[in-house]
């Protein structure tokens, strides 16, 4: 499946914390940068996300803001 | 100003394309990764975003999805 | 690629309108329901989206609201 | 109230799971398609969302991605 | 229609600018605060949004960030 | 840091409720209007958000919908 989302950042999962319904997944995309995703527990289970696995952080362009110092 | 958004990816602006109301800004965050942001033309003007400038791609954790191969 | 987004609605593309930077794509998902997506022109080109093609509307669960009469 | 969101999918609620702060609501919109919404517990209470009730999944066009096989 | 979105800010429309596909609508919610919405041209037409009209800015709680000085 | 998000609403925090992973923060922006934000517990801790503190609700324009009666 190819998706319209413009941003797909490859990395390694460094943390998976499930809450009551919502999980937080951290992906190390290299260069010292960790990306945090807030997704459903159901998605964690279905995709079998686990520490050490390869994964992509996917973000729609309209959800990216720009900041400057 | 400190913001709750969990993801702040530092890089250099490589492209700014303004449309009628919406602009696309590309930021090279290193490691061969370009992030695309879709923001208002007004924000481009106000932040004086231009190619070569240092900028951050900022993304709320709830806007990050996770994908696996 | 499998993605964490909980909602993947299969249908047929009925309209693709490109603007200056942002395109609107309509997908008929059956039962008389048309879904409208606002995505980048670049994604339309890369995925070769065209009227009559099969496509999926993909939505993260945290972007779905619920309404009642 | 009429809202600018382009997508309003009518269906029947099939599941309501409340977490600590965030609830997941599933709506069967017909044709074998279930839509999952992640909303606040407070909204579930205020709208009295319950299994069997008629409800609409509402999504802003800019939150819809498009995917192809 | 009642919606799960937690934030509904009432005001008066002060500007409507249509682009090629995307419009920007400004709503004065009082206290010197203007809210900007980026929505489809189609929604502007359907809701007959025009300067001087009463309108609500509606935002899902998961799309609100918090910042501190 | 200056951010592209068009909407920054200043107010006072009136409630902070942490869930298992996701927190709800209410900010009174004046004129009788309370804004609710759903953010990570981690952000609440890092920004030391607490009742009575001054804070800003920040929203990207593309996450704002418009409604009319």
Image (tube, coloured by chain):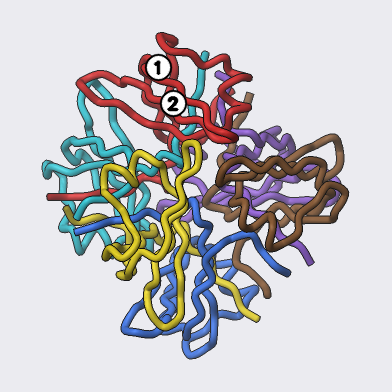
Chain colours: A red, B cyan, C purple, D brown, E blue, F yellow
Number of residue marks:
2
Q: Nearer the viewer, residue D30 or A35?
A: A35
Residue E22 lies, in percent from the top left, at 47, 62
Front-most of F57 and B63? F57
Residue D9 higher or lower than E48, as above or below: above
Tell me the residue at 20%/25% (across/down): B30
- Front residue of this view, candidates C3 and F10: F10
User: Measuring 58% from the left and 55% from the top, which residue is drawn there?
Assistant: D60
Q: How far from the left and from the top, in percent, is residue F28? A: 39, 71
Name which quarter of the figure residue B64 lies in. top left
Q: What number is the disc on residue A13? A: 1
Q: Secondary structure at mark 2?
A: strand
Residues tagged 1 and 2 counted as in contact (Cβ below 8 A): yes
Q: Is residue A39 left or right of residue D45?
A: left
- Label 2 packing within 10 angstroms: few (<14), some (14-19), many (20+): many
Reply above or below: E50 against E62: below
Query: Does E32 sit above or below residue D27?
Result: below
Instruction: Say which quadrant the N terminus of chain E sits in.
Output: bottom right
Letter of the chain that mark 1 sits on in the rendering:
A
What residue does disc 2 label?
A25
Q: For the residues marked 1 and 2, what is the alpha-carbon distance in whole angstroms?
A: 7 Å
Q: Is residue C43 left or right of residue B2?
A: right
Q: Is residue A12 left or right of residue F48?
A: right
């Amino acid at each position: 499946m190819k998706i319209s989302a413009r941003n797909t950042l490859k990395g390694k999962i460094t943390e998976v914390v499930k809450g009551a319904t919502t999980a937080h997944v951290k992906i190390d995309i290299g260069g010292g940068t960790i990306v945090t995703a807030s997704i459903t527990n159901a998605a964690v289970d279905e995709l079998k996300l686990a520490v050490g696995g390869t994964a992509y952080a996917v973000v729609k362009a309209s959800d990216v803001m720009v900041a400057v110092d």
